[in-house]
Structures are given as structure tokens and as C-alpha cells.
Image (tube, rainbow, N blue to C red):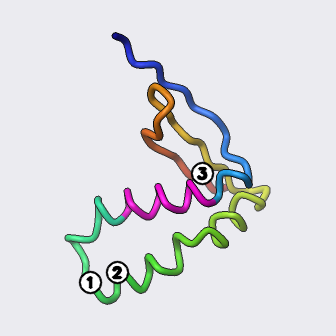
Amino acid sequence: MPHAITIISAVPDDAADLARFSRKTFVDAFAHLNNQEDFYAYVSTAFTQERILSELRDPDCFFFIARMNGTWAGYAKLEC
């Protein structure tokens, strides 16, 4: 069965899911490369729902969500 991939622009209603997903993918990718105390101090502020919501409302910041067969598969954040 082919994989159906869709990419959509994130909206403020996506903030909670985007915060969870971005935190998980960041931790999975980079935790092992960093000092744990410093790393998790950064993660605890950079990936909150409130911070993501603020960025979603910023007209110079864009998020895109990729879904494969309806399941989150990735995201991109673009800043101008």
C-alpha cells in the first residue's frame, strides 16, 4: 500500500501537539550529544506549548506538519 504523505501549515490549534512532537524528536536526535542538565534545561523552555503558540502567532515564523497516513511524520520550522 502506498504511503499518503500530506503537508499542512500549522495553526495555533496545533500548538499542544506540535510542542509534544517537536520536543520528542529534538530529544531523540540530540540528547545523547549534550550535557544532560544543560540540554534538558533548554528543552524545558524551548518546547513548551506556550512558546510554540507564541511562535505560531509570529508573522515571521512558519511551521509545517507532515503526516503519513494520518500520523505525524515530521515538521519544519521556518523563520524569516
Residue 2 position by quadrant: top left
Q: Earlier in the sequence, mark 3 or mark 1?
A: 1
Contact check, label 1 and label 2, Cβ < 8 Å: yes
**Residue that numbered label 3 is attached to:** 78
For label 3, the crowd category at 10 Å Cα-Cα, with few meaning under 14, some 14 to 19 and many 20 or more, is few
- Look at label 1 and name its amino acid: Gln
User: Up-down: is 63 above or below 7?
Assistant: below
Q: Secondary structure at mark 3?
A: strand
Q: Residue furthest left?
A: 32
Camera-side residue: 19 or 57?
19
Q: Which of the numbered marks, if any, corresponds to residue 36?
A: 1
Nearest to viewer (mark 3 / mark 2): 2
Give the residue displayed 72% in from the left and 48% down from the top: 11
Q: Residue furthest top?
A: 1
Residue 60 is situated, as x and y percent measured from the top left of the image, at: 74, 56
Residue 16 is situated, as x and y percent measured from the top left of the image, at: 61, 60
User: What is the CA distance from the residue labelled 3 to the residue labelled 1?
Assistant: 27 Å
Residue stretch rendered in magenta on the structure: 16-26
Residue 8 is situated, as x and y percent measured from the top left of the image, at: 63, 34
Camera-side residue: 64 or 50?
50
Q: Which of the numbered marks, if any, corresponds to residue 39?
A: 2
User: Up-down: is 22 above or below 50?
Assistant: above
Quarter of the rendering occupied by the N terminus: top left
